[in-house]
Amino acid sequence: MKSEVAYVVGYLRPDFPVPKATQMRGEPMEIAGNQESSGPDQLPTAPAVVREKPGGESMRAIILERFGGLDSLVYTDIPKPLPKDGEVVIQIKGFGINHAEMHMRRGEWAEAAEVSGIECVGTVDSCPGGEFPVGAKVAALMGGLGRTINGSYAEYTRVRTGNVALIESDLPWSQLAALPETYATAWTCLFRSLNLTAGQTVVIRGATSSFGQAALKMAAAAGAHVIATTRSRERFPLLEELGAARVELERRDLAQHIAEAKQLDAVLDLVGNSTILDSLNMLRRGGTACLAGWLGGLAPIVDFNPLLQMASGVYLSFFGSFVFGTPGFPLSDVPLAQIARQVAEGQLDAKPSHVFSFNEIHEAHRIMEAGEAGGKMVVVMEPEKAA
């Protein structure tokens, strides 16, 4: 696999049918340009340009001037978001780089705002409802960021309170910026969808993706026995170093070759539709497989018939990170502060593979597009002192 596209359901594949997000509450903003499309089911022809009315404070931002290559990302000044009830204005200190943003830049996504970026960390600039104190360190993700509302490629953003969580920590912003999307999704899959506990055995399929690496590290830290898969034998040492008890070469019929077949407690399947039935066949009675990625492509399971193709007594679960912030999935449910403590105490290694300054967004996208990330990449707004 050249790149790590599609590791999060519904966001990192442009052809996945993502539900339309509800527009933000509050008074209408001035709209400088609508997001046009050639039909109800067609991709947009231009980014959605939604800004505050001019005349107030301004901020530095990276805007998507048009759909296209790296030069479509342009630095400029736009109005700073104003406070609104039920929402939080965040002064951004850092943000992760995600494949969704590459697809948005190219015009391959169903929705794309002028300011991209689906996650960030920073401090609370204003919160009229008092849900978060001004100055508190927080993380934010989803909630339409970068899609229906301006995202994190800027000095400030505004997002619904349900998509914000406290993340008090002394870790540098570069490490905190690596946590929200990747670790919130991995934690939810492991400990909510799979209900993984110490001593259980879990297979993580597609473990060399940034999401897979995060899940591997978290599962191992929780005391689980982790079997990881990859398509490349060259990646075996990396996965073993991250905590895998054993590494298997990924194959569509892994259940026919793995020694623990019919004994496994859980499978986190990031390869997707091409392997999920095989994952179900590995499980013991009462075991669960969680489908949370499509590294192997989005071709559907042809003529799926549970009666003939699904093992009895096992459970199939699905998780897509686009639900964060919706009823039943508040971001506050994810213990990001605890995860940050584990990183600070050395129980988890969340160091990003690349750290860029705000003025290096083109290089970040170039590396992502070339499939050379090698892990989670982040942007920080201010230079950090070397440790």
Image (tube, grey):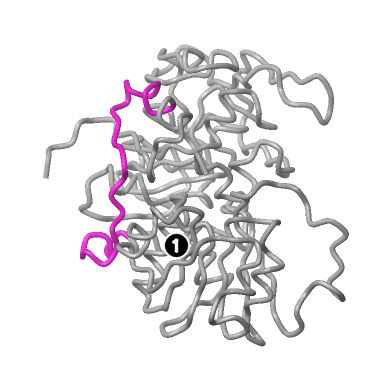
Compared to 255, does 141 lie above or below? Answer: above
Callout 1 environment at 10 Å: few (<14), some (14 to 19), or many (20+)? many
Query: Residue sitting at 13 percent across and 37 percent down?
Result: 385
- Residue range (magenta): 340-365
Q: Would you say 361 lies left or right of 101 here?
A: left
User: Which residue is located at x 27 percent, y 63 percent?
Assistant: 341
Q: Quadrant of the C terminus?
A: top left
Q: Mark 1 points at which residue?
A: 215
Viewed as shown, does residue 290 lie left or right of 132?
right
Expressed as whole percent of the image width and height from the top left, the position of residue 265 reads 56, 81
- Where residue 222 appears, as percent x and y from the top left, is 37, 75
Asked which quadrant contains residue 89, the reply is: top left
Image: 158 above or below 255 = above
x, y percent for residue 223: 37, 79
Q: Is residue 355 magenta?
A: yes
What amino acid type should be assigned to the residue bearing mark 1?
Ala
- The residue lying toward the viewer, choosing from 24 and 227, is 227
Residue 355 vs residue 32, the one in the foreground: 355
Q: Where is residue 330 in the image (x, y as percent from the top left)?
A: 54, 58
Label 1 secondary element: helix
